[in-house]
Image (cartoon, rainbow, N blue to C red):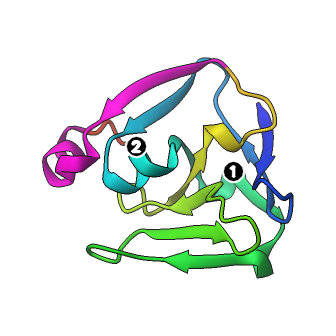
Amino acid sequence: MKLGGGCHCGAVRFEAEVLEPPVPALDCNCSVCRMTGFLHIVVPHSDFELVTGRDALISYRFGTGTAEHLFCRHCGVKSFYQPRSHPDAWSVNANCLDEMPELAIERFDGANWEAAADKLHLPS
């Protein structure tokens, strides 16, 4: 199923191919996800297309610096980013989709990232 989405001002737009509903999603309680309301849908790089806005993206890294958090420099919204947990995929913010699909939400204890990552059901 193809989904579209982007940032608040519309400068950043993407399309993503995801599984049929219910779409797996992660609700992370780490500081940045909790503060920004990010709800993760993991999309392999090959199933994601940045349609517009490459020049509008700015990057933020913290902690280990592995994850690359990408924000629209105009409106500040992070509609997708490169997660530490899935180096071959983008994490798309379900809250930035044009239409919200039915989700199968799994809690992720990102506040205790190392222990939680060991339990994460990563795609094979």
Q: Quadrant of the C terminus?
A: top left
Quadrant of the image for the N terminus? top right
Instruction: Give the label on residue 47, or none.
Output: 1
- Name the side, left or right, on which 117 lies relative to 57: left
- The count of marks equals 2
Could you tell whether 124 is left or right of 19 in the image? left
- Residue 114, image x, y percentages: 16, 54
Which of 36/23 is in front?
Answer: 36
Where does residue 5 sit, x and y in percent of width and height?
Answer: 78, 46
At 34% from the left and 74% from the top, the residue drawn is: 62
* Residue picked out by circle 2: 124
Q: Gap between marks 2 and 1, in whole Å?
A: 15 Å
Q: Residue at x 21, y 52 (%)?
A: 113
* Mark 2 residue type: Ser
Rendering coords of residue 103 (x, y %): 57, 21
Q: Secondary structure at mark 2?
A: loop
Q: Amino acid at mark 1?
A: Asp
Q: Which residues are magenta?
A: 102-119
| Residue 116 x/y as whole percent | 20, 43
Quick check: 73 above or below 38? Answer: below
Locate residue 82 relative to residue 48 in the image: left or right.
Answer: left
Residue 24 disc label: none
Q: Residue at x 17, y 48 (%)?
A: 112
Q: Nearer the viewer, residue 110 or 117?
A: 110
**Sequence order check, earlier mark of 2 and 1:** 1
Question: How many residues crowd around disc 2 within 10 Å: few (fewer than 14), some, or many (20 or more)?
Answer: few
Q: At 70% across and 23% down in the image, what residue appears?
A: 101
